[in-house]
Amino acid sequence: MSQQRLADTLGLRFQQIQKYEYGRNRVSASRLFHSALILGVAVSYFFEGLDDPPEEGADPQEEAVRAFLRTDEGMELVKLFSRVPSARLRRQMLQLVRAIATPEPEIPA
């Protein structure tokens, strides 16, 4: 859908849609909801790719794992790795990844 058509449907000017898109103006929750209905998407569509804020006192390593699992690659890797039938082969794959991964800086306790 074009920006002009979306603007017309929302009763706005084309320039206002551009300001929303580029983050120059804030979008109210009701306008965001209405836009999602018009575009035929869930409101969450507009937030895809954004990280959730870390929980208070959350373990940084757990947060890193959660962030990884929110990526397409992370989810695919977990699904495929869990389908490898041999525990020995899974351990060897893990050793390979350890060997090629860059060292992670240690997180102070």
Image: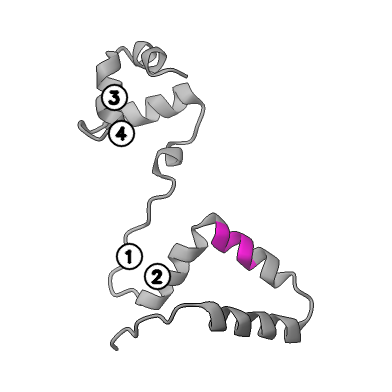
Nearer-N-terminus badge (2/1)? 1
The magenta stretch spans residue 77 = yes
Nearest to viewer (mark 3 / mark 2): 3
Q: Amino acid at mark 4?
A: Ala
Q: Where does the C terminus fall, quadrant-wise?
A: bottom left
- Give the residue pinned by disc 1: 54
Going from N to C along the chain, the mark reached first, 3 or 4, is 3
Range covered by the magenta-colored residues = 73-78
- The type of residue carrying mark 1 is Pro
Residue 75 appears at what percent x and percent y? Answer: 58, 61
**The disc label shown at residue 36, or none:** none
| Residue at disc 4, secondary structure | helix
Assess whether mark 1 and mark 3 are in contact (beta carbons under 8 angstroms): no
Is residue 104 placed above or below 26 in the rendered structure? below
Q: Evaluate if marks 2 and 1 touch, with contact meaning CB atoms under 8 Å apart.
A: yes
Dot 2 lies on which element?
Answer: helix
Which kind of residue does numbered mark 3 sit on? Gln
The tag earlier along the polypeptide, 3 or 1, is 3
Question: Neighbour class for label 3 at 10 Å: few (<14), some, many (≥20)?
Answer: some
Picture coordinates of residue 36, whole percent (x, y): 43, 29
Crowd tier of the residue under label 1, counting other residues whose Cα lies within 10 Å: few below 14, some 14–19, many 20 or above: some
Q: Residue at x 25, y 20 (%)?
A: 16
Residue hosting label 3: 18
Residue at disc 3, secondary structure: helix
Residue 29's label in the rendered image is 4
Q: Are marks 3 and 2 in contact (CB under 8 Å)?
A: no
Cα separation, mark 3 vs mark 4, equals: 17 Å
Residue wearing tag 2: 63
How far is the residue under mark 2 from the one under mark 1?
7 Å
